[in-house]
Image (cartoon, rainbow, N blue to C red):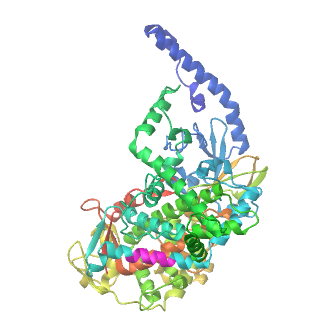
Amino acid sequence: MLFLLPFASSLPAIPFMTYLPELPIRYSTLFIALSVAIAIEIHRSLPRYKKGLQRVNNLPGFRSLISPFSGAGFGTPYIPGVYPGFDMPWQGKHKIFRHFGRDVISCVSWNGDSVLYLADADLINRMNANQNVYPKPVEKYDVLNFLGPNLVTAHGEDWRRQQVISKGVFNTDGWHFLWGETVRIFDGMMRAEGYNDLKSGDEVKIKHSVSMTLRVALLAIANAGFGMDMSWNDDQNMPIPAGHKMTFQTALHCVAQSSILRLAIPKWLDWLPLKPYVFCLACLVAIKLTLDPSVREMVTAFDELEKYIQSMIKEKRGALLGEKTADNEDANAELKFELNERQDLFSKLVKASLSGEEPLTNEELQGNIYIYLLAGHETTAHSISYCLALLALWPEKQEEMYRQIMQAMPSDGVTSYADYKKFEYVLAVYFETLRIFPPVQQIPKKLSQDTVFTFDKSNEHNVEIGIQEEAKRKARYEANTQSLPSPPVTPVKSSFGGKISASSSSSSLSSLASGGSMSTSTSATSIDSAEDKPPAPKPAFLRNRSTLTPESVRAAPPVPVPEQMSLTVEKGTVVFISPPAVHYNPKYYPDPYDFRPERFVGKFDQTTFIPFSTGTRVCIGRHFSEVESVAFLAYFIKHFSVHPTPAYEGETREEMKKRMFQGTPLITLTPHSIPLTFRRR
């Protein structure tokens, strides 16, 4: 409401009180009461608002009626002049920083809450060097304590203790186990879905690629994470164990699918009876959550998963400690041997928790297993799905990826984690996907003392700085890849009609990605006349080779050094590091909306790549996601080429790109709809 004050003096005098007698008395009284309440709220809020501006030295940025820390701030979309939106970091990316002219902006709410948003990687890197001054505001993560304290929500000595124990769980033996399980899951999918029986050129259409990748990630976390032995075609209707309401697999799948909803529901709604409450809205929400079968199923799944995890912890701990968890001593001995041999995260975490001087409690074990499940399932599934979409939209990159996969793949097709580093381009494709679609949208820090920030006063030269840095990387990539041999490419049949020759596979794939329309892409080629056309031109990053050398970069006009500015920020101010803004900042990634895996071939600046958080609290399961994704993508692209499925006849490449680039920031960035066509190689 305080935003209306500057305009109040310019409004004509409106004798609105003269109209009140014409209204029923009850409405007149309500109107007066509401006006008085608004006036009181404005009077109370104005000092807090001024204090919020002072806290960030009136740095340009958003001025909002809704605080991003309030309940209304979570889930409220962009409202012009009222609230920038809960998804502002993803929707705005670096454009909002460019609008305000610098890579550090503020958001001050009517109630005095003040926040800084950062897109400056140099400033972020300096913050990471002094974690004591910029601690994580763990109180904002309390909702993730649903099953118990964990590595995400812990702080201080508790965090260090859990971090030491958890770090020992993620090691080379576990990566070998994960790689083998992922390949086994892929083989199971090929058999169960009948893909092994497809002939070259046969197609499989899928309405939403997430439906496939979620299943892959679920099996990976179940087998490599929980030590289960699930396969692609496991029957979900297996008998429910006594004392339970659903199987472990069903509970695991339901929890992974509905975690964001569960985190939004307070504990007391689990047993909420239908009784009167003071606020009508609360009553309606309570009734909805109480009666909705899907919500009740979700609550049951969380309760069941908690029971299963508690039982597994008790059983495995008992076996390791030599305690009898059953009457059969042979069963205990067998379980103890299995725990000592298995490399799944759950078994290793239980063992590690018992080996230290300060072992994890049962609640901490539950909490960390839940976090591993949440991050290992949803994040990886969505990222692989986005990756397949990008490969479909940029077919020349897909062919480069296929070429390098065939070069790295052993002749018998059998791989292990020892081959992981050979698939460098596959990992680069995955990293570029995470750059374009970072799972985490904002990383909060809270100042523990008054601090001075120093950063560029203007970001107007970001593009020029980025172009020079990118040129060096392009030249390095070209030098590293000119001698790589190309594997033979099998001609395939287009689903749009016509033939595609081996020599024009890259150009024909470009045409498919643009919906068969030459006007939508400069590299598109007509399907019907593909054999008469020359090979597709080199990708844009390899054109004009003379401009990609360090010498040409040095000969270019020097980029002006940006002027620095200092900002004194008060203790208690919350700072949001914005991965989308950093990843789309042209200072670090020129043409940020273009898909260029080459950015991550060889050495790259890791301080500008922050999809898994930053500093000492970077996601401990990062490599789990990388290993699983590289293994699955390497085998999938070896067997299939990926193409976009038009939503309607004549849909252009740009229209498909806009549609498939959509996502909603929930716990992680979630794709909307990615229909794809897989063609057997």
Residue 365, quarter of the rendered image: bottom right
Nearest the eye: 188 or 552 = 188
Estimate the x, y position of residue 163 in percent, counting from the top left.
69, 64
- In the figure, 112 relative to 620: above or below? above
Decide whether residue 385 is among the magenta residues. Answer: no
Q: Please name whichever residue, 615 or 53, is drawn nearer the observer in this view of the structure.
A: 615
**The C terminus appears in which quarter of the rendering?**
bottom left
183 vs 462: above or below: below
Q: Is residue 17 visible?
A: yes
Q: Nearer the viewer, residue 437 or 373?
A: 373
Figure quadrant of residue 216 = bottom left
Q: How many numbered marks have been drawn onto this rendered protein structure?
A: 0
Seen in the image, is 470 located left or right of residue 530? right
Residue 200 horizontal side relative to residue 412, left or right: left
Q: Which residue sits furthest top?
A: 21
- The magenta region covers 179-187
From the viewer's side, name the closer residue of 510 and 426. Answer: 426
Where residue 194 sits: x, y (%)? 29, 74
Q: Is residue 395 visible?
A: no
Among the 4 quarters of the image, the one containing residue 184: bottom left
Q: Is residue 182 magenta?
A: yes
Q: Main secondary structure of the magenta part?
A: helix
Q: Residue furthest front?
A: 327
Q: Going 69% across and 43% down the picture, which residue do you hit?
A: 58
- Picture quarter with the N terminus: top right
Image check: 240 left or right of 60?
Answer: left
Q: Position of residue 474 (x, y in %)?
A: 54, 79
User: Which x, y percent locates residue 403?
Assistant: 42, 85
